[in-house]
Amino acid sequence: MNQKRKIRILVAKPGLDGHDRGARIIARTYRDAGFEVVYSGLHQTPEEVVRAAIQEDVDMIGLSSLAGAHMYLFPRVVELLQENGADDIVVCGGGIFPEDDIPKLKKAGIKELFTPGTPLDEVVKWVEENVSPRAS
Amino acid sequence: MEIAEKIVSGDIRSVARLIRDIDDNVPEARKVLRDLYPYTGKAYVVGITGAPGVGKSTLVDQMVTHLRSAGKTVGVLAVDPTSPFSGGAILGDRVRMQRHSMDEGVFIRSMATRGYFGGITQSTRSAIDVLDAMGKDCIIVETVGVGQDEIDIVQSAHTTIIILVPGMGDDVQALKAGILEIGNIFVINKDDREGADRTVNDIRLMIEMDEKRYKDGWKPPILTAQAVFDKGVKEILDEIAKHRKHLESSAQIQSTRKYEKVRNDLSEMIKDKIIQDVFNEIIDSGEFETTIQSIVKREIDPYTACDTIISKKLKKGAP
């Protein structure tokens, strides 16, 4: 009843990658964990992702990529958030990433990357420990 | 005053944050809403409702395109249900409208019902005010996929559109109460499907049989469409414009509408505030729990307990 603000998350698929099963499963998992999840659908540009994130006032963006374009798309989202004064929004990624890319992505501001086989409750726990709803 | 100024000047982030604060019952939000109130009352509000899967989001998406080419700015509130089990929600209406997300003249916001019945959210009324104050010419509210009863949208919208699809068959006959009584415009979407004519006739029959209900002189038109192919959308917008003209044609209609809207809004606000100030407070303070225990132990009866709490709470607490 008296709030504890709900965590709002944008699950987005930037780029041309059409594999959305993972993103949908994650969206459902977040919902079952009590979060409000805005699902953006496929083929989003980084600009569209950031615009949606701001309009929806989310606390976190979960970017899904299984088609290899993450080294451009993910840092670009972080960049645009900074340009729009919204860098308090946490960005993390899920999907297929070569091991070598993960530290580079983290350096570019993506807080965590989740690869195949990660247990779902670990994904939820990470959010609970690293994302808090915006203070008013 | 600052936040209100930002909103009136159209700052997206401020608008988005305020809507969230309203949703989360942040006390400071109320002050901003007060400051914004003088700037409200300009936008035209359209409600879109209907069963799950009839094409509400698709239609909204097309309507936004048409409105934008006519030079109007648009705000969209898209409502989806909160899971009663987890308290979470998947807000998926935006998917169908994302092509408008980069348009500066469009603001799209997804909202979860959070247990509120009625088809919209507890915060929808106020969110409409915010988009209104922000300067949006037209505000479209897409309700959750409704069944028959969730008709709160009527109180907040100037024009309410009911969307159906063919093949509801005998169900249409059964759906006499509730949403079929409140529509200003009926749209049979996916009209390429079998049974479209039958559905049109069923609705027409229902409207003809209830002529006395249309006391203010507006008989709901029945349109058909294929929203996904942008067929019939222009006609829908034309009917909305006609309905708007009808509402504005008579001072009597306008003042009745205004009175009823204010009456409804105020009633809901008072109820919501009482729940907030009384009920939520005793839950937070633990008084609710201890009172339950006392009643269970038969130390006090529930009627006395209830009356005591209410009279205590309502005595304290100034705005």
Image (cartoon, coloured by chain):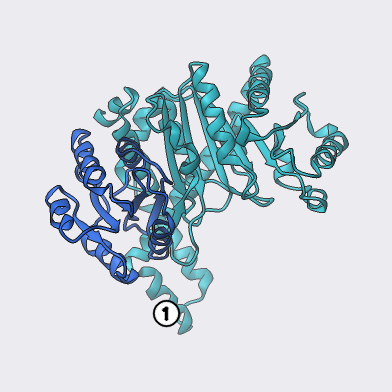
Chain colours: A blue, B cyan
What percent of the width, then of the height, locates residue B264?
A: 57, 39
Locate residue B262 relative to residue B177 in the image: left or right: left
Instruction: State which quarter of the image contains the C terminus of chain B.
Output: top left
Mark 1 — on which chain does it sit? B
Q: Where is residue B69 in the image (x, y as percent from the top left)?
A: 51, 18
- How many numbered callouts? 1
Q: Which amino acid does label 1 sit on?
A: Gln
Of residue B294 and residue A60, the one placed in the foreground of this image is A60
Q: In which quarter of the image is residue B221?
A: top right
Residue displayed at 65% across by 17% down: B245
In-image side of A2 versus B206 (left or right): left
The quadrant in which the N terminus of chain B is found is top left
Q: Extreme bottom residue here? A: B297
Please tell me how crowded label 1 is: few (under 14), some (14-19), or many (20+) other residues with Cα within 10 Å.
Answer: few
Task: Name the residue: 80% across, 52% down.
Answer: B174
Q: Is residue B195 above or below residue B137?
A: below
Residue that mark 1 sits on: B293
A15 over A3 or under it: above or below: above
Residue B15 percent coordinates (x, y):
34, 34
Asked if one can make out residue B30 in the rendered structure from this viewpoint, the answer is no
Element marked by disc 1? helix
- Of B214 and B95, nearer the camera is B95
Q: Where is residue B249 in the image (x, y as percent from the top left)?
A: 67, 15
